[in-house]
Image (cartoon, rainbow, N blue to C red):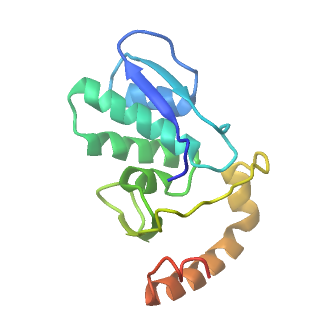
Amino acid sequence: MLRPGVRMYVGRGGGRPGVKHIELALEGLGVDAGVVYESPVDLGVGYGLSAALALGAALGAAALAGRPMLEGARLAHAIEVRLGTGLGDVAAEYYGGGIEMRVRPGAPGVGLVDRIPHPRDLVAVAVDLGRYPTDRMLAELRDRLAAAGDRYMEELMREPTYESSHL
């Protein structure tokens, strides 16, 4: 988990930030609520913020509507698919923690996520290299990412430890 993470409040009344992911989450669960969030990164720079916004709004809306959290998580996944953002980030964020491996694709409750715990004292340093929209990245890098992903997943599944996860 990267810290500091996104902080979000979903409640009755108040304004909305005008983010499509949030609007679709509230509409999808039929909830009229205000949303406020703060994030250490901007939307579109690759830290899973679109998934976090969809997931946070959908979970908050599900709670307000008295609906199951899994329903909110599935809605957030559908929003990411519909908008072409994220690459399975909702499932990773919903189940969260450690180095996440998507064993079977799909929404929470459908896909299968496994995790490799990481040392508590692990420090990761990340640099914002600017915006790179998911649809453009996929158009430009899909084949190379798929080939590398298959190769590394095969190696990682042979030895699913933190030490082998950064091959």
**Residue 24 image position (x, y, % from top left):** 46, 30
Q: Residue drawn at (27%, 41%), measured in percent from left and top?
A: 69
Residue 65 placement: quadrant:
top left
Direction top: furthest residue:
13
Is 63 left or right of 28, judged from the image as shown? left
> Please, which residue is most extreme toward the front here?
121
User: Measured from the top left, where is residue 135 in percent x and y?
Assistant: 68, 52
Q: Is residue 146 visible?
A: yes
Q: Residue at x 72, y 60 (%)?
A: 139
The residue closer to the viewer here, 123 or 33, is 123
Residue at 52 percent across and 37 percent down: it is 6
Task: Tell me the quarter of the image containing the C terminus.
Answer: bottom right
Instruction: Say if 98 sits above or below 133 in the image.
Output: below
User: Where is residue 92 shown, x and y percent of the image?
Assistant: 44, 57
Relative to 13, residue 63 above or below: below
- Identify the residue at horizontal 62%, vertical 75% (top origin): 146
Q: Do we see residue 82 in this rendering?
A: no
Residue 130: x and y, percent? Answer: 79, 46
Towards the viewer: 41 or 113: 41
Q: Above or below — where is 27 with respect to 2?
A: above
Q: Is residue 58 left or right of residue 144?
A: left
